[in-house]
Image (cartoon, rainbow, N blue to C red):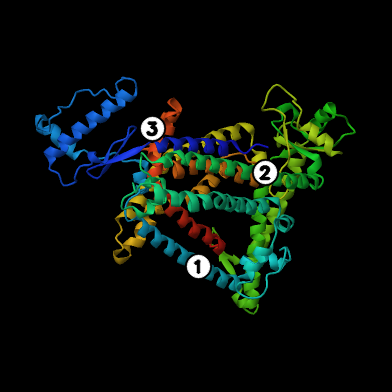
Amino acid sequence: MAPPCGVRLLAALFLLAAALGHGTEKCTLDGRRLVAGEACSHDHALEADADETAFLHQHTLLVDRLVKRTAGGAGGAAAAEPATAEPANAEALSPARRSQIATAAPQTTAADIYGVKRNAAGDLAAFLSALASNSITMAVILCVFMFLRKMYPVIYSNNVLEGWAPMTPPEGIFGWIQASWQTTNDQVEEAAGLDHAMLLEFSNLGMKIMFRIGAPLLFVLGPMNALFGGGFAGDDNMSKFSFGNVDPNSWLHMAHPFFIWGVVIIVVKSIYDAQRAFLPRRFHWLRLMPEPRSTTVLVEGIPFDQRSDDALRKFFEGMFSEEKVKSAYVVKDTAHLCGLIASQKAAENNLTETVSRWENAGKDEANKPTMLTYTGYRVDCRAYYGLQIEEFQKHIKEERQRIKVEAAFVGGVNGACGFVNFHSRGDAEIAQRLDYTPDAEEWVVSNPPGPETIRWQDLQDPPEHASVETVIGYALVAGLYFAYLPLVIGIAKYAGMINMGPFQSLWSGIAPSLGLTVMVSFLPTILHLIFKSFFSLKDEAWAQYKLQNYYFWFQVTFVILVTAIGGDVSDFARTLATSPFEVFALFGKSMPSATHFYMNFMVLQWVTHSLNLLRYINL
């Protein structure tokens, strides 16, 4: 089976971006970076302390030369058409124009908002400080986890206490490490299910890919860049091992494409190997699926005139035969009944708690528990909750009788979803592959969710309500996409304003990626809330599946491609839609000069993943 489309798209995208980035050279102008498609020599660099007149004059000449070079490389076509030509001599500029050029503010990009800094000298010290601080933080988190694991065994070792764990960890504070290391994916699948086993396998796959591509890049390509690159990085010691140290005229430009193709081949092959290893597990899981789930199908979009148990059964008996259909039931609208049952349970819990407190106090009738009612009378809590339970039981019995009577007729409490159970699994599989009507939204037959994770409230929703809620959900996801940059401005702004004094070197390695880390950490929670509130999911696990797809593209856009987005996500999306091939040149120009930010970001992820050990939400 082929890898996911997103993986193949990213492989091709970064291959093109890296190839285009190899032809990109930079020249420094008064502390600003100008990126040009043509090579520019170091003689173009101006001293930062030049006076304003010399700066304007040299700026005009340089821009004129770059425009001419670009026009010449494009076959004589004009590369830029300014509305009014600037004089070549700076003294000929009007005072207003001179002031306009001198005070012009640089464009704020998404990278600036995120705090993404371009590669520069001094980044190595900040990176080493961040590496040390995050390593220490991770060690502290592990120590706290080992302490809490002994203090709260129900939260951290409940599967061991219940006997569900594959093995019992040895005694000692480090026993959990040995047990985790020795547990196989087969044992995890048997104890916790296939999804949990595949989550661990996904993490293992990521580590394998990082090792397979990281080792040759670090120990082969890195030393080649450092020794034979020509020292283009200057004082930026952190870029010595990267492509930023390669001179524009170096022969290493011919070697880098081979390494790029090597990375693509290794990643694709690793994914194919993981997919081949997954398929036997998937087939094994399907074969072991117990009845009645394996012989049952979920039916959605039942037409109104077929919305009853008898009508649904007769429809499928007509499609197959009476002997093949075992049972058929339409989902009933039991929202009111569920509310009554929840109220009864709440009253029972209140009664149990009240009686327990009274018994612990010595069962003194003089101090019996009382409460003030809405009418202003003080009554005995035990009698009050007892009467509540009796009333709820009466209403529950009446509601169940009403549902049973109305279920015999078409419509009413009968919804648009149902379940059909067959005698054989083969008939259930055939039922999922048939087309019952030209309307794609009617008689939609699929595998049913697991009984322990099914979302009955989604199955009870009328189709028209579900459609409106789905539109609202998509609108919220789109709004989150375009509001993502403004949401992170505050974090990036205030993190950059903080002065840590003697710890500023340490903070400078953490602050630039702190805003992005916070938003990326909260993004799954926000998306998951939107999916569960507005989308018809049918199964709790389907929310995770939808979250995985959307979260992947959010991360691609706002983590990997943040340096290329510019000042507005909508402008970037417009460019992608109108001129899709232009984005590859944009990636090649912007992404290679921000690699230090991504290294700090990856190191910071150690802490965020270590925090999962603490289960602080459950605490």
Q: What residue type is labelled 3?
A: Asp
Crowding at dot 2, Cα within 10 Å, few <14 / some 14-19 / many 20+, comes out as some
Residue 607 visible to the viewer: yes
Q: What element carries label 2?
A: helix
Front residue of 240/585: it is 240
Residue at image position (65%, 68%) is 178
Task: Kindly identify which numbered label has been placed on residue 571.
Answer: 3
Q: What element carries label 1?
A: helix
Q: Which residue lies furthest to the bottom in this view?
A: 362
Cα–Cα gap, marks 3 and 2: 37 Å
Crowding at dot 3, Cα within 10 Å, few <14 / some 14-19 / many 20+, comes out as few
- Up/down of 562 relative to 386, above or below: above
- Up/down of 355 relative to 73, above or below: below
**Residue wearing tag 2:** 275
Q: Residue furthest top?
A: 76
Q: What residue type is labelled 1?
A: Ala
Residue 60 in percent (x, y) is at 19, 32
Residue 251 in percent (x, y) is at 41, 40
Q: What residue type is labelled 2?
A: Gln
Task: Kindly identify which numbered label has been placed on residue 81.
Answer: none
Ranked by sequence position, the earlier of labels 1 and 2 is 1
Cα–Cα gap, marks 1 and 2: 34 Å
Q: Is mark 3 on a helix, strand or loop?
A: helix
Ranked by sequence position, the earlier of labels 1 and 3 is 1
User: Dots 1 and 3: beta carbons under 8 Å?
Assistant: no
User: Dots 3 and 2: beta carbons under 8 Å?
Assistant: no
Residue 353 in percent (x, y) is at 63, 68
Front residue of 71/560: it is 71
**Residue wearing tag 1:** 139
Quarter of the figure with the C terminus: bottom right
Residue at image position (64%, 41%) is 458
For residue 156, which quarter of the picture? bottom right
